[in-house]
Amino acid sequence: MLLKVAWLIVSYWFEQMNYTYKNIWLIAFPVMMSILIEQLINITDALFLGHVGDVELGASALAGIWFLAIYMLGFGFSLGLQVIIARRNGEQRYSETGKTFFQGFSFLLSLAAVLCLLSQTLSPILLKHLIISDDVYNAVIRYLDGRIWGLFFSFPFLALRSFLVGITQTKALNMAAFTAVLVNIPMNWLLIFGFDMGISGAAIASSFAELCSLIVLTVYMFRHINRHLYGLHWSIDITVLKEVFSISVWSMFQFFMSVAIWFLFFLAIERLSETELAVSNIIRSVSALFAVIVNALSGVTSSLVSNLIGAGEKRNVFPLCHRIIRLGYAAGVPLIVLALLFHQSIIGAYTDNPIIIQVAWLPFAVMLLNYFFALPGYVYLNAVTGTGATRTVFIFQVITTIAYLFCLWGLSHWNVPLAAYWTVEYLFVILLGVQSVFYLKYKQY
């Protein structure tokens, strides 16, 4: 009888540390919903602004990516915070998870204040020298004036999400995502068209939606999380903050750089014409839906890998990655097929301009097929992050960025179609994946 009980305990532990498809999905799906908050906000902005004008549609791309680059500094820190929380959870040092969370929460709130002030001061000066079109520049600044204050809501939300993902209790993220969407869509319509605020209304609606989702997650934390078990008592511990920052700083640089080159990509497109810029914003907006799957599964990968290492189960890292990739293909491929079949309806939802609909088809298809390379690339990259080697991940990012920018520079000297620019994304994710696989195979961690 004792042997049977022991076997059941061992079997249960083995199952938990190998993470079945069901376990991975139950953890990843709420994370997808939470990531969908930021993406749906951008998608909704593009959908509404596409019916305001081509300038506003194109400007929302540049403004959205500029804001996203700033946002990624907080996101990168939250990823490192998530890794530490997950490691403590895997080691069953539950009270340390709460202490770690509060250090991250305090830092992210302070970072939001600093970045808001810097953006208000420096963004107009920097963007004036980067954007050629005066109309696009003015629209970008109007958007940022209302959007940047959303950092005071999105950064605390990131801290809460890192904690819930780190302890693998992610169901509340569904409610937060649903709330954001429920608020953002009617607010966009009301402010953009009802009050005739245009692109400024889209920015304010987005920030307000993030506030509402933060409120939902905060209420859930107070009502459903055992504060005593997880040590959720406000405290400042510089030693813990330094530990989190030593891992997070490289993630911050990595994610900032990944979006910064995306911004440079759109600057290159802006130099083609306002039509190509508007087309690329539509494509970027649709790609965000597929990025939700990729980012959620790859983000969960870092947390689960960190839990595995904390439990002494390093041998299960590659099997876990393979399961996550298969799960990602199962979720994404049917959506790719539907998007290819109904591409005209999807693109037409953003604009009534027949020229934009026609020009968008080929780069749209190129973007969709990149999913087959992006999913494994980012899963393996985040597995490296889960080992705590965030500096190594940053180095991979630097190497890949140099190759990426070199290709963009080469294309800018040739008269190539818009689709050619989008193929450079293939190079980016493949290089990241290859470097990550080599690290996981041959590096001790």
Image (cartoon, rainbow, N blue to C red):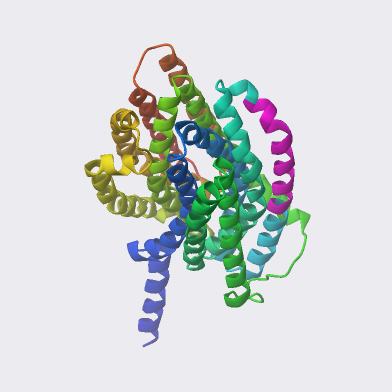
Q: Is residue 118 magenta?
A: yes
Q: Position of residue 225 (x, y in %)?
A: 59, 74
Q: Position of residue 18 (x, y in %)?
A: 39, 62
Left or right relative to 323: residue 32:
right
Of 177 and 352, which appears nearest the observer? 352
58 is higher (above) or lower (below) than 332:
above
**What secondary structure is the stretch in magenta mostly built from?**
helix
Residue at x-position 47% and y-position 55%? 185
Residue at x-position 45% and y-position 58%? 33
52 is higher (above) or lower (below) than 27:
above
Q: Is residue 141 magenta?
A: no
Of 351 and 234, which appears nearest the observer? 351
Work out whether residue 396 can be spotted: no
Residue at x-position 74% and y-position 50%? 110
128 is higher (above) or lower (below) than 372:
above
Q: Position of residue 45 (x, y in %)?
A: 49, 45
Q: Position of residue 116 (x, y in %)?
A: 70, 43
Q: Which residues are magenta?
A: 108-127
